[in-house]
Amino acid sequence: MIEHEEGKGLGSAFAHYAPEILWTVFLMSVGSIICAVAVNGILVPQHFLSSGFTGVALFIHYLFPVFPVGSIYLILNIPLFLVGWTLVGRRFFFYSIIGMAIFSVALFTIDINISIHDKILSALLAGIVNGVGSGIVLRSFGSAGGTDILCVILQKVFSIKVGTTTLIFNGVILGVAAVFFSLEGALYTLVYLYVNTQVLNLVVLGLSKRKVVFIISDRWEKLSEEILKKNRRGVTIIEGIGGFRREHKRILYSVITFQDLPVLKKMISQIDPEAFVVVMDTLEVMGARVGNQPHW
């Protein structure tokens, strides 16, 4: 009887987590394949470097062509994962091991050459492709290993954007590339890294960007009611005092999605055309309804 209950509990737990596991593995597989296409199809033929540990692996591969990029990448990740065990969440850690394995296999198996003779166009395309692939991987509950783990730690602790951390880290790689290869090659790689950074930020955070809205209006009660009921967004009422006339004011504070912003602006202009409105970007938002913090 006890064995039956235990088996039932395990089966229920698997059924509960199976969709998450399958979705995460799917995202990591798709993202890893896209990244491998960028590496083997564009970066290697053009002799460019890449971001993070992939760039280090490519650097070693160019110096010692006998070592495959996939093998080097796998070896480099071992000490990083040993350190990351105590610094990142367990779920992210184990999913990242799976992602690292998938990406390493993709680097081994995908053999494609995207024939583009112009190096600038090659750098642009590689940045777009790799940025999309890396972003898809980081939209999952894990990563493909490498500096993704470092990026996640800095994102969680210091709220530094993933792409920004990647750009800073790769400055060292660019310097080494300029010394060991050529300044021209380092500059082409810089173009690739910049495009990759922008696309990566867009995929990870930009598509779910939230806006902070401050509204100062004499018709704050009506505006608050419309935001709560019709827009179905939370609103906070802040007490304020005008700096010139020293009048007491009510300031409405709300966090909305980028898609809802035009609707909100139209509603404000209809209720109070004289309202003072400030709209600001956000880095990340934690919350069940409007949060855009990655699942790390």
Image (cartoon, rainbow, N blue to C red):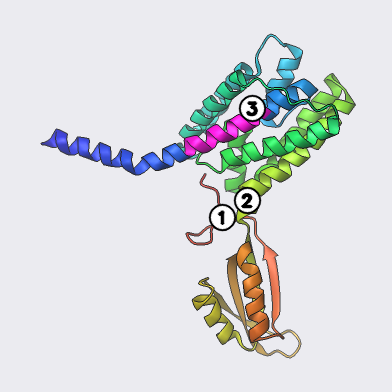
Per the image, the residue denoted by label 2 is 205
Q: Residue at x 48, y 38 (%)?
A: 24
Label ID, residue 292: 1
Lower sequence index among marks 2 and 3:
3
Q: Amino acid at mark 1?
A: Asn
Residue 15 lies within the magenta run: no
Is 181 situated left or right of 210 in this image?
right
In the image, what residue occupies the spot 27% across and 42% down? 12
CA separation in Å, label 2 and label 3: 22 Å
Q: Position of residue 109 (x, y in %)?
A: 59, 19
Residue 107 against residue 11 in the figure, above or below: above
- Identify the image quadrant of the N terminus: top left
Q: Are marks 1 and 3 in contact (CB under 8 Å)?
A: no
Quadrant assignment, res 44: top right
- Residue at the location (49% across, 77% down)? 229
Q: Dot 3: what SS?
A: helix
Residue 115 vertical position relative to residue 163 in the rendered view, above or below? above
Asked if the residue at tag 1 contacts the one at tag 2, i.e. Cβ–Cβ closer than 8 Å, the answer is yes
Local crowd size for mark 3, using a 10 Å CA cut-off: few (<14), some (14–19), many (≥20): many
Identified by mark 3, the residue type is Ala
Reading the image, the residue beneath label 3 is: 36
Q: How many marks?
A: 3
For the residues marked 2 and 1, what is the alpha-carbon distance in whole angstroms? 7 Å
Residue 222 position in % (x across, y down):
56, 86
Q: Secondary structure at mark 1?
A: loop
Could you tell me which residue is drawn at 57 percent across and 47 percent down? Answer: 156
Q: Secondary structure at mark 2?
A: loop
Say if 80 sits above or below 264 in the image.
above
Using the rendered image of the protein, determine whether residue 264 is visible from the camera's viewpoint.
yes
Where are the magenta residues, as a range?
A: 24-37
* In front of the other: 82 or 184: 184
